[in-house]
Amino acid sequence: MNSLDRKLLRDLWQLRGQVIAIALVVACGIASFVLARSAYSSLRLIQDTYYNRYHFAQVFASLKRAPESLKSQIGAIPGIAQTQTRIVVDVTFDLLGLKEPIRK
């Protein structure tokens, strides 16, 4: 052990409170990163499992007007397992007891 190593150890011993505080802050940062990363991985796994189990769409497409015959053409595209068409319309509900109408 040379003199610089001894000096380093002596300085670290004198600043042990600060060194411990810095080590704890770094450890908390690493723990927070690991926690966030594992939560993200878990949520992605749950989402993928849900999508596969309930045949949830990976892609949605909205059109203003399209003929129903377009459904079979879209279904013929490679990689498309299932197609579904529907009509979506905005409506306003007037309910008793509410001052404002409900828009859905």
Image (cartoon, rainbow, N blue to C red):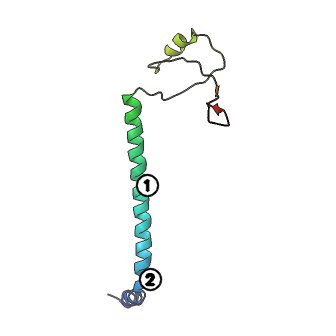
Amino acid type assigned to the residue bearing label 2 in the image:
Gln
Check the image and name the residue furthest to the front: 97
Residue topped by disc 2:
18
Residue 59 image point, x, y percent: 52, 28
Q: Is residue 70 above or below residue 9?
A: above
Kindly report which numbered mark, 1 or 2, lies closer to the viewer in this rendering: 1
Residue shown at 42%/89% (left/top)? Answer: 11
Residue shown at 39%/52% (left/top)? Answer: 38
Residue 86 image point, x, y percent: 55, 18
Amino acid type assigned to the residue bearing label 1 in the image:
Ala
Q: Is residue 84 above or below residue 48?
A: above
Residue 18 image point, x, y percent: 44, 82
Q: Badge 1: how crowded within 10 Å, few (<14), some, or many (20+)?
A: few
Residue shown at 41%/63% (left/top)? Answer: 30
Residue shown at 41%/84% (left/top)? Answer: 17
Q: Is residue 19 above or below residue 48?
A: below
Using the image as rendered, state which of residue 46 and residue 17 is in the foreground. Answer: 46
Report, in whole angstroms, how far the alpha carbon at label 1 lies from the one at label 2: 27 Å
Residue topped by disc 1:
36
